[in-house]
Image (cartoon, rainbow, N blue to C red):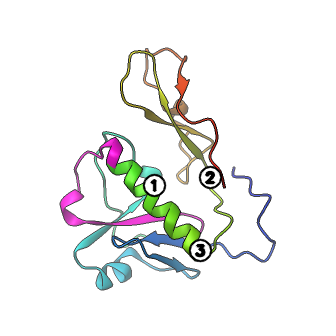
Amino acid sequence: MGICSSCESTHVATAKLVLQDGRLQEYSYPVKASYVLQKNPSCFICNSDEMDFDDVVSAISEDEELQPGQLYFALPLNRLKRPLQPEEMAALAVKASAALMKSGDKCVCRKKSVFPVALPGEKSPRKMASGGGARGGGGGGGTRKGTTSKFTGLLSAIPE
């Protein structure tokens, strides 16, 4: 469950879509991915909660509705079913952050928080999640079976 104490009670949750050029589109009404794709035919839509380092990027179904409070990316078709490299994920995070700041959205309520960590012996950080995702999966915090629970945080704070 997400906490967002800085939100005003009149804040309307919207589905947020970050386009390839960095612009943000918000939908306060139900909209299917197919509608968005009509305006962006060289793209696919992916759910930010489904993206992970070194994991393939999958498109949401064209019949799926964009969910309020959720962040999506419109990515070029050549990225579909390709592993997402850490530097690509970082670039997308920067793009989303800039788009959200430009929109004036001071409160982005999320169902889970994500922070990069490096397990002992690993060179690149991995995503660790806390809380439940939009689909209700806990996932055990992002560690694999048989790995130690000791980790080193790479970020001490994220300014808002």
Neighbours of disc 2 within 10 Å: few (<14), some (14-19), many (20+): some
The circle on residue 93 is: 1
Residue at image point 30% right, 84% down: 38
Give the extent of the magenta segment.
Answer: 68-87
Q: Residue 11's image quarter?
A: bottom right
x%, y% of residue 52? Answer: 39, 44
Mark count:
3
Q: Answer yes or no: is residue 160 visible.
A: yes
Q: Answer yes or no: is residue 66 visible.
A: no
Q: Residue 70's image quarter?
A: bottom right
Question: Is residue 73 inside the magenta stretch?
Answer: yes
Q: Quadrant of the C terminus?
A: bottom right
Mark before the other along the chain sequence, 2 or 1: 1
Nearer to us in this view, 113 or 34: 113
Q: CA distance from mark 3 to mark 2?
A: 14 Å
In-image side of 153 versus 35 (left or right): right
For numbered disc 1, what is the local secondary structure? Answer: helix
Q: Amino acid at mark 2?
A: Lys
Question: Is residue 59 inside the magenta stretch?
Answer: no
Nearer to us in this view, 101 or 35: 101
The circle on residue 59 is: none
Residue at image point 43% right, 33% down: 126
Task: Residue under label 3, please give it.
Answer: 14
The circle on residue 111 is: 2
Q: Amino acid at mark 3?
A: Thr
Dot in front, 3 or 1: 1
